[in-house]
Image (spheres, rainbow, N blue to C red):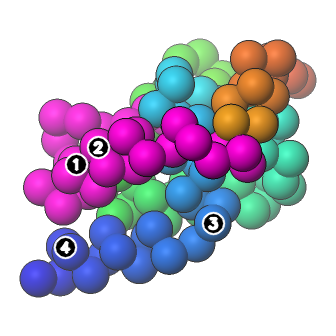
Amino acid sequence: MQELIKAMKALSDETRFRMLNVLMERECCVCEIIQALDVSQTRASRNLGILEAAGFLKSRREGLWMLYSIDWSGANRYASSLSRLIKESAVRHDVLTEDRKRLKKAQRVGLKCD
């Protein structure tokens, strides 16, 4: 029951919902997410941490970069099911479509972003 509550709370924020939408396209570093969603580094990092703690994401370090992706295999059963639902419903929403368009132009910037 606690896993379900944690997953539902994580999805109760529009920014986190948008982050999942972008990360379903591809693995991203924080600066790419910032560009795609047009949010601050602090907001992006804080919300990525919440999604990771709720079981939606996994992260890995590649040199100086911290990369985030959907944790399809390791996610708790609720996070995995909710991620699939988001993927199926995200296609038709203007904000989510714009985020995905901006992601295509996003680049890793600076020496490091995490």
Q: Residue 112, relative to residue 5: is it above or below? A: above
Does the magenta-highlighted stretch encompass residue 71?
yes
Q: CA distance from mark 2 to mark 1?
A: 6 Å
Q: Amino acid at mark 2?
A: Arg
Residue 93: mark in rendering: none
Measured in 3D between alpha carbons, the distance from the residue under mark 1 to the one under mark 4, in whole angstroms, is: 11 Å
Chain-order first, disc 2 or disc 3: 3
Residue identified by numbered label 4: 3
| Residue at the disc numbered 1 | 80
In the image, taking residue 80 as reference, residue 70 lies left or right, namely right
Q: CA distance from mark 3 to mark 1?
A: 18 Å
The earlier-in-sequence mark between 2 and 4 is: 4
In depth, the one of 70 and 59 nearer the eye is 70
The range drawn in magenta is 67-96
User: Which residue is located at x 44 percent, y 70 percent?
Assistant: 10
Dots 2, 1 in contact, CB < 8 A: yes
Prevailing secondary structure class for the magenta stretch in the rendered image: helix
